[in-house]
Image (cartoon, rainbow, N blue to C red):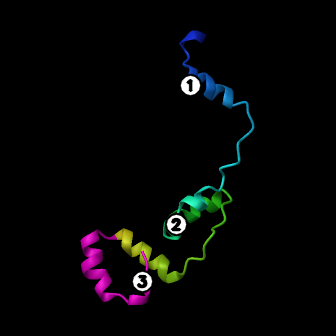
């Protein structure tokens, strides 16, 4: 591969590697995600996040953890027709 075979976009990417890390958009997710989305992410990614030093931003109740596990463990029809009707309403008030 010759130098002339590299696209302008790739040249820019290579040049960006020597620049300092841009931290200006580090926490933009806090503005773009709603609390329900953050709860889902923090619930399902908690262990991995902790390995990388991530500290959760929300306190997730035990009932919400249970609800999320049940919600994503079962197919929609089973969750809606069997789990929801026979579960305490307090657990399933959000999401």
The label shown at residue 45 is none
Left or right of 3? Residue 73 is: left
Rendered view: 66 above or below 9: below
Structural distance between the alpha carbons of marks 3 and 2: 17 Å
Residue contact at pointers 2 and 1, CB within 8 angstroms: no
Residue 39 vertical position relative to residue 16 in the rendered view, above or below: below
Q: CA distance from mark 3 to mark 1?
A: 48 Å
Which numbered disc, 3 or 1, marks the residue that appears first in the sequence?
1
Please tell me how crowded label 3 is: few (under 14), some (14-19), or many (20+) other residues with Cα within 10 Å. few
Instruction: Give the labeled residue for mark 3.
Output: 93
* Residue that extends furthest to the front in the rendered view of this protein: 31
Mark 1, secondary structure of its residue: helix
Name the residue: 51% across, 63% down. 41
State which region is magenta: 74-95
> Which residue position holds label 2?
34
The answer to whether 26 appears left or right of 9 in the picture is right
Main SS type for the magenta part?
helix
Residue 23 visible in this rendered orientation of the protein: yes
Q: Which residue is mark 1?
A: 9
Which tag, 2 or 1, sits closer to the chain's start? 1
Question: Residue 78 in the image: x percent, y percent?
Answer: 26, 75
Q: Position of residue 15 (x, y in %)?
A: 68, 26
Classify mark 1: residues with Cα within 10 Å, few (<14), some (14-19) or many (20+): few
Q: What residue is drawn where x is 62% and y is 26%? A: 12
Residue 80: % across, % down = 28, 77
The Cα atoms of the two marked residues, 2 and 1, are separated by 34 Å
Residue 38, percent across and down? 54, 66
Rendered image quadrant of residue 95 = bottom left
């Amino acid at each position: 591969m010759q130098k002339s075979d590299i696209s302008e976009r790739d040249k820019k990417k290579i040049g960006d590697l020597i620049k300092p890390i841009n931290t200006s958009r580090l926490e933009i997710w806090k503005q773009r995600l709603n609390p329900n989305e953050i709860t889902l992410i923090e619930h399902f990614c908690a262990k991995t996040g902790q390995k990388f030093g991530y500290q959760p931003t929300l306190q997730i109740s035990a009932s919400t953890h249970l609800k999320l596990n049940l919600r994503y463990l079962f197919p929609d029809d089973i969750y809606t027709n069997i789990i929801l009707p026979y579960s305490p309403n307090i657990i399933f008030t959000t999401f």
